[in-house]
Image: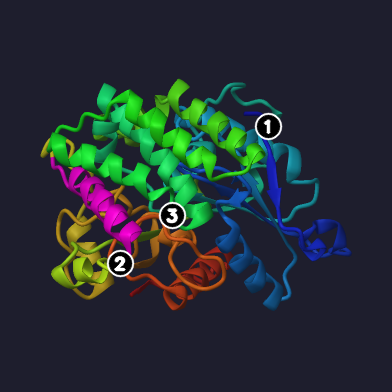
Amino acid sequence: MLLAAAVGQLPDPRSNCQYAHGMSCVRVYLSPGMFGFAQLAAYDYFEHLRSALAKRFDAAGQRVEIRVCEVHPTASIRRRAAKLAHMIAHTAGSDDGPIHVVGHSTGGLDARLVASPTVHLEHGSSPQMSWIDRLESVTTLNTPHYGTPLATFFATAKGQQLLYAVSAITVTALKLGAPPLAAASALVAALGRTGDYVGVELALVDRLTDAVSRVLDEAASRNLRDWLRQVRDDQGGVVQLMPEAMDLFQAGVENRPGIRYQCICSYAPRRGLVDWLGNVLSPWATVSGTLFHFLQRLTAAHDPRYPCRAPQAQERLAELCGHAPPENASDGVVPLASQLWGTPLWVGKADHLDIVGHFPGPGQHNDWMASGARFDIVRFEAVMDRLFEGLMGWPHNRSS
């Protein structure tokens, strides 16, 4: 929805602060979410977002250094946040340039925890936090601030197996455009047989992993298996994303005074007949659309005691969007009402990975699943404009 700290940095040397010649350098840190990584199987999770931001900073004549924190995909938020703080401490330099943290999904919670004045990470108030006075903004993208019902399912024994299988499909879909169709179809068929309470046999998960590994080269396949092993071995973060656990997170994690908190939120509309007919000519779209619908249905679950929504969420969303989205609207992973935190920079139709550039289209954009959001490069560029303006301190509330 984590390894020794690693750095993903733009290859363009102009982005390196040593070329600033006295000009203060803006440093932007990107923190991936569940299913997230810096680079895996030769695929860069933040490639499109990072390139879009670099282009905008360059056009504004501002030196920027953009780095990606490599974190365990499903470990605890505290472990992930400690990795992020450690990386910033070792790469932020000694100048007085501003620091911004952008977190996607669970990565947004990592950013909020790092910024909190009440935080106690692995080393308490050690020198790894000496940079905190330079932190200017925390921006969260599709982050479950109030939890997600999907985590409640993924925390079950059968849900953990499904999480493992979806992780394998996600990575190969992003890298190749689609995983092996037979393996993915077998997973969807298993979901269809089990109804609302999913049971995915471990043998099926292993077959899926073998199938997707065969279509990758040896190094990428080994890389993928190592990453999936992390998902299987430590799922502490999944439990922490449950609505009940996020209730405690909200009680203990505070905003730091002087920091701009802002968010980007999205939802995928319920799929209609036209969307299903449009998938007939694409076997992978049919399979992935079915899987997305299943995840979206789980995410729509509602518990009135832990409702997964910000205060006055529906009223705020109606004002931002110009209409009231459905109360159970989600991006397929996180309820829309759970994504609100701070100043909304953009609210509109997109699924969970569209926002970071994983949607169908030119420029090596590969989709995650056929969500029906119809997100495209035009809307992505609009989102990137709002994100850049927010980092620069020029927020404009927009929807699309």
Please indicate, yes or no, whether residue 387 appears anywhere in the rendered image. Answer: yes
Above or below residue 231? Residue 328 is below
Decide which of tag 3 and tag 1 comes sooner along the chain: 1
Identify the residue at horizontal 63%, vertical 48% (top origin). 42
Identify the residue at horizontal 66%, vertical 38% (top origin). 219
Instruction: Report, in whole angstroms, how far the alpha carbon at label 3 lies from the one at label 1.
Output: 40 Å
Please name the residue that numbered disc 2 is placed on: 373
Type of amino acid under label 3: Ala
Identify the residue at horizontal 45%, vertical 38% (top origin). 211
Q: Which portion, as a residue range, is magenta? A: 282-302
Between 38 and 24, the residue placed more toward the observer is: 38
Please indicate, yes or no, whether residue 245 appears anywhere in the rendered image. Answer: no
Identify the residue at horizontal 52%, vertical 25% (top origin). 120
Type of amino acid under label 1: Gln
Type of amino acid under label 2: Ala
For the C terminus, the image quarter is bottom left
